[in-house]
């Protein structure tokens, strides 16, 4: 039987810097000899990427937005994540269900309970083995975003939206301390990488 693959997710508010580290994590794992599937949400499949284009640009009700996040996720699980893990590959996914708790549940104030219903309905048993939550003070996240390309529907939200989103991420981390590790990504990139490197190494050593 294949050695079991691991499911890693990266989270954080827009501008927290997680995308900088996603490619580096995948490259590091490959250098250690693992087969890695690097993917993202919403997206990761042709249908999921089409849904991504819609949720990032079209205005829609909160319920529709939340359901589309999960629709893209269902497809992603069935087509990409579960087959990769079954092959023994490692999956590095830029955002997953914690993002729905944070953005729709917290930022848009849907509440965690409504998100939990959909999570239960979809695939409750499959949780990431490790989630890194990239965390920065909001002023820094906002400053990083200001330098970015054309902002999407979420990136255009007001500061209070991101305060609620960040608070919901912290609530997730408090509720799942074994799985979610907070990464202070206001530090220099090398220091962040040193933490990730050590924690990634530890993950490869767990049975
Ligand atoms: P993001 O990772 O920020 O993409 P990029 O770095 O290319 O801008 O993700 C896009 C947005 O989608 C982000 O603002 C958060 C939002 N999002 C949700 O609101 N709910 C979700 O469940 C997911 C997966 C993402």
Image (cartoon, rainbow, N blue to C red):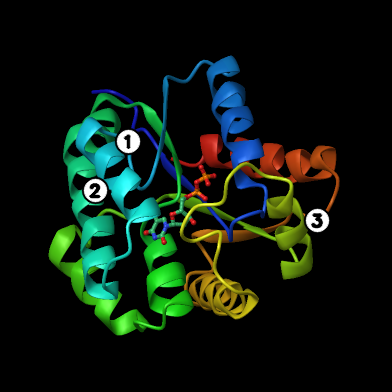
Q: Which mark is residue 72?
A: 2
The percent position of residue 172, horizontal first and vertical second, equals 49, 73
- From what the image shows, is residue 185 above or below residue 168? above
The percent position of residue 204, horizontal first and vertical second, equals 53, 34
43 with respect to 21 (left or right): left
- C-beta proximity under 8 Å, tags 3 and 1: no
Q: For residue 161, which quarter of the picture?
A: bottom right
Q: Tag 1 or tag 3, which sits nearer the N-term?
A: 1
Mark 1 secondary-structure assignment:
loop
Q: Quadrant of the C terminus?
A: top left
Q: Identify residue for label 3.
A: 186
The percent position of residue 142, horizontal first and vertical second, equals 71, 61
34 with respect to 145 (left or right): left
- C-beta proximity under 8 Å, tags 2 and 1: yes
Q: Identify residue for label 1.
A: 44
Identified at 64% across, 38% down, the residue is 21
Label 2 C-beta lies within 8 Å of the nearest ligand 1 atom: yes
Identified at 53% across, 61% down, the residue is 180
Mark 3 secondary-structure assignment:
loop
For marks 3 and 2, give the CA distance. Answer: 31 Å
Q: For residue 148, which quarter of the picture?
A: top right
Mark 2 secondary-structure assignment:
helix
Q: Which mark is residue 54?
A: none
Identified at 83% across, 44% down, the residue is 191
Q: Quadrant of the N terminus?
A: top left
Identified at 67% across, 47% down, the residue is 17
């Amino acid at each position: 039987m294949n050695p079991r693959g691991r499911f890693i997710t990266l989270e954080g508010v827009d501008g927290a810097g997680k995308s900088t580290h996603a490619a580096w994590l995948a490259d590091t794992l490959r250098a250690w000899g693992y087969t890695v599937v690097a993917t993202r949400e919403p997206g990761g499949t042709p249908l999921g990427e089409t849904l991504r284009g819609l949720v990032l640009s079209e205005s829609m009700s909160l319920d529709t937005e939340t359901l589309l996040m999960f629709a893209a996720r269902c497809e992603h699980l069935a087509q990409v994540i579960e087959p990769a893990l079954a092959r023994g590959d490692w999956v590095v996914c830029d955002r997953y269900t914690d993002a729905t708790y944070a953005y729709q549940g917290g930022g848009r104030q849907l509440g965690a309970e409504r998100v939990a219903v959909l999570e239960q309905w979809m695939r409750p048993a499959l949780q990431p083995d490790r989630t890194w939550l990239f965390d920065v003070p909001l002023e820094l996240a906002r400053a990083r975003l200001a330098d970015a390309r054309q902002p999407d529907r979420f990136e255009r939200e007001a500061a209070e939206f991101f305060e609620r989103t960040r608070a919901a991420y912290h609530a997730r981390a408090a509720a799942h301390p074994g799985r979610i590790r907070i990464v202070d990504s206001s530090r220099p990139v090398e220091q962040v990488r040193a933490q990730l490197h050590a924690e990634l190494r530890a993950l490869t050593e767990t049975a």
